[in-house]
Amino acid sequence: MFRKRIITVFVLLFCLGCFGCAGTQKKEAGDKKKAEALERVGTSYMAQGNLREALAKLLDAEKLDPGDAQLQNELGLVYRDMAQYDRSLRHFNKALSLKPRFPEVQNNLGTLYLLMSKYALAIESFQKAVDDVLYKTPHFAYTNMGLVYYNMGNYEKAIQSYQRALRLEPTHSTAYFNMAYAYEALQKWDEAIDAYQMAIQYLPNDPAAYYRLGKLYLSLNRKKEASEAFQQFLDLAPEGPDKEEVKALLKTT
């Protein structure tokens, strides 16, 4: 009788333990769903440029699910764009501690180091990103690496990085645009013009390329082509911040 009572009590405690586990798991699943919903709202605010609202939602999500590597990455991006670099660094590093193989975070970390003028660390992060064979967009990291070399004054290496990006994604207009800057720094005018034109070919509605191309043509005394480029700029950005400068330049062509 005593033995049966012990067994009954043990079974009862075991069942209560199971119910406790199920309850905990249910709560964790519920918290994760709430965190995912908050994260979606936060990333939507990020896309709109509303960084403070984005941060508020993402921090609420983090309270519910602090072990989500993607959420830590998004917090790193928001803090980076708010120029709170130390906080951004902490979240990027936490994302990598949770998910060591995360090339998108390595790329984002590299952009942070670039903003902090820590060029060696930036290149190291971009290299880790492109070395990962599962990274779906390595052309972004190569383009960012080119920016690092450009800022270091190593224009040849910058061009090599942009060329690597374009071998992977031949329509990547940003790589062409940035490469044109590097060619200008080397006074390779024809190559710069070609690069701006390729940037325009793949992103025809970008006024910045027409602005830079117009200024380059004007510096080379190719006034007719400069006039055409400036007019294209004004057609695309009639109320842009550079409109008065472009109008003044247009009068000199």
Image: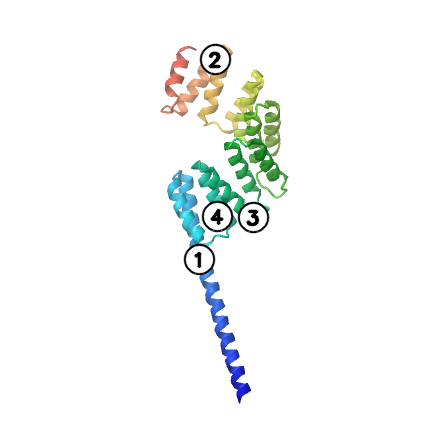
Using a 10 Å C-alpha cutoff, classify the residue at mark 4 as few (fewer than 14 neighbours), some (14 to 19) or many (20 or more).
many
Amino acid identity at mark 4: Leu
Q: Mark 2 sits on what residue?
A: 218
Name the image quarter holding residue 237. top left
Name the image quarter holding residue 234. top left
N-terminal-most mark, 4 or 3: 4
Q: CA distance from mark 4 to mark 3?
A: 13 Å
- Is residue 97 among what the camera can see? yes
Tell me the residue at 56%/40% (across/down): 106
Q: Secondary structure at mark 3?
A: helix
Q: Tell us which disc is closer to us: 4 or 3.
A: 3
Q: Tell us which disc is closer to us: 3 or 1.
A: 3
* Residue 180: mark in rendering: none
Amino acid identity at mark 2: Leu
* Residue 71: mark in rendering: 4
Q: Mark 3 sits on what residue?
A: 97
